[in-house]
Image (cartoon, rainbow, N blue to C red):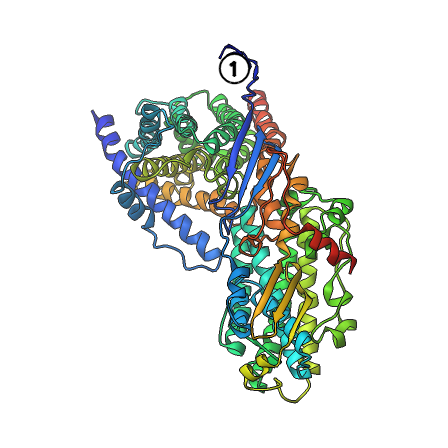
Amino acid sequence: MVDKHDEVKKIEVDYTRLRIPFGPVHPALKEPVLLRVTVRREEVLDVDVVLGHVHRGIEVLAENRNLVQTLYLVERVCGICSHSHTTCYVQALEEIGGIQPPERALYLRTLIFELERIHSHLFLLGVMAHEIGFDTLFMFTWYVREKILDLFEKVTGNRVHHAMNTLGGVRWDLNQHMVDDIRATMKDLQKSVHRIYNFFQDKTVEKRLCDVGVLSKDDAERLCVVGPTARGSGVDMDVRRDHPYAAYTYLKDYFSVAVREKGDVYARTEVRLLELFESISLIQKVLEELPNGPIRVEDNVIRLMRRIPEGEVISLVEAPRGELLYFVKTDGKEGLRRLKIRTPTIPNVLTLKPMLVGCEIADIPVVVASIDPCMACANRLIVVDATTDSKKIVDMDFLRRRRQA
Amino acid sequence: MNTLIALLLAFPLVFVISLLFDGIDRKLHARMQRRIGPPIIQPLYDFIKLFSKERIVPTTASSRIFTVSPIFAAVASIMGTSILLANLMLRENTGGDLIVVLYLLAMSSVLVMVGGSSSGNPYGAIGFSRKMSMLIAYEVPLLLSILSVSLKINSLSYYDIISVQIAAKSMLALTFPSMAVAATAFLICIPATADAVPFDVSEAKTEIVHGPLVEYGGPFLALFKLAKSASNLALTLLATTLFFYLPAVFRVYALPGLSDLLICLVFALIFWFLTITVPRTIFARLKVGQAFKFYWLVALPLSVTAVLLSVLGL
């Protein structure tokens, strides 16, 4: 008893250190995640990322459904990059079943893909502007984004969950009217994006974004960071170019990958801004090259599904947030034995610690937003760090295997 | 006696005008962002609605300070603004000079800090320390610019300064170079005093969840909001009357009724638009260090120059 008392006495309480819960509900966060931040005055000393507030058990649900039902399930992994998820999943199934979707379908998939990238990046840029208190830019960016959502509605009938993909092709075709609409919108968009680009070079914006949350190239490679977060740190990677899928096989030469070396928040933002321009020109190219022909192999999806044998495949796409990976293992009886989804946020969220330590409190929302976290996507693992000194990263071996492949 | 009546009249007037100006500010802010925006009397609706809400005092808060500080903050800033309005209505010195007004305005800011830090919320504590830095940053140039005016006029009475402008039939800021510099420093200080973007570091919504106001809701929040609007009105009114007393130029002070007061209020609204609405529309929020640096490197030298110039007699 006496010993215990002495022990308590010995502990020095550092009253200058303040532990603030940044989340799970916080105006800067669009989705629940808890950052346990230790600060001394304005300086961030330590960060502890706690995920798991929106875990929905999608992988388990997928094992209890048939292949086509799962297609609609994985669409709901994420509200922003829903098309990336279905494309990645459908690609895997087509690989296992040896189904070759027609060329027009591939082009249409790519079209929706790039529209989705624009909509996702504009979404993020708006959030970014909101985090730094620049609400006018936030409103303008989202106003522009609304036009893309309108296009989605026109083409697929849905603004968010497009349900465009199906086994062996796509569900909806483009008519001339839609093509004209998309062309006109892209023209408008180019101007608006130029304006947004200029806005982001405003002095007060640069003051908040430059030299904040720096992620070195070494750290980026060590943490297997993907997507714009990696490209902002000088890691030149893009699945669309490195492992082309859908119509990117034919369009490889028509876009360049924006890479910035600095690794700060501004670099990541700039990469996304430049990708907007690339996506716009890519969409125009897709519309030009759009081949004629059928949009799916067969109208009866059930018959197609029955043809898919037992097998396992890893499928990759470049979602707006980065490389999205699906491991699909079918059981040959219309079902799945295992579905493993590695969303881009999972590696990216790990970078929050090296980025945030040493920053100011004011930088936390900006840095968190800069990796474009999609918490609903990421809630399948628990990362405990720093305070308890134990690290538990689910399926790290799996990631390593993928890197070697 | 007259003074008392004027003050009693000014109290509800401040309440209505400041909330109305706040509503106009929100509407213009929205229009500049391509939004429709709330109706102009939305802040009044908000006030009434917030008063019908439950009073919540967090268990971690020291409840007496927590509940008392919003009341005192509202009273202080409404009183400060009322003194200005009473002066303008009676067209004479009604007692209570510039020092009192500035003291009351500063008091309402300090009470926001105190209330926030008494809530026991870590965000309140961070808001407290940020507000403290900001107070040090903007209060000094603000007071110095007022000081240069009173040095120039040789009086600390509010209406004396206006009388000088009426006698000269000109605005103070356009007559003396020292006053022009002082006016600039004063106007630069308004956005920080009003906690408007880019200087709203103490309330930064996305960073520290409204800082000191984080635990406040219901009537307490309504009172703090009222205090903020009233002190904004006082500041813009001060800028209008001390440096740019337009009725002196238009010579309407001789007209019957309160035409000079009306003109002052209209120009206060214009200054509100220029110093609060426009900055918060076109800028991103600065960090506390950057905001502090701005005030000590831009506003402070300006106000010191103003004081020096007025001492030199310019």
Q: Nearer the viewer, residue B195 or B81?
A: B195
In the image, residue B79 above or below residue B266:
above
Q: Is residue B187 visible from the viewing direction of this image?
A: no
Q: Where on the picture, by quarter, is residue B234?
A: top left
Residue visible at 45% across and 59% down?
B35
Q: Quadrant of residue A138?
A: bottom right
Q: How many marks?
A: 1
Chain containing mark 1: A
Q: Nearer the viewer, residue A302 or A351?
A: A302
Considering depth in this image, is B245 or A35 the residue closer to the camera? A35
Residue A113 position within the rendered picture, expressed as x and y whole percent measured from the top left: 63, 70
Other residues around mark 1 within 10 Å, as few (<14) / some (14–19) / many (≥20) = few
At 68% across and 40% down in the image, what residue appears?
Answer: A354
Give left or right: position of A64 versus A219: left
- Tag 1 secondary structure: helix
Q: Residue B173 placed where, x, y %?
A: 51, 35
Q: Quadrant of the C terminus of chain B?
A: top right
Q: Is residue B161 left or right of residue A258?
A: left
Q: Is residue B169 visible?
A: yes
Q: Quadrant of the N terminus of chain B?
A: top left
Q: Quadrant of residue A114?
A: bottom right
The residue carrying mark 1 is A4
Near-viewer residue (B200 or A362): A362
* Image spot of residue B36 (x, y percent): 41, 60
Direction bottom: furthest residue: A293
Type of amino acid under label 1: Lys
Whether residue A302 is situated above or below residue B78 in the rendered picture:
below
Residue B243 percent across, percent down from the top left: 47, 34
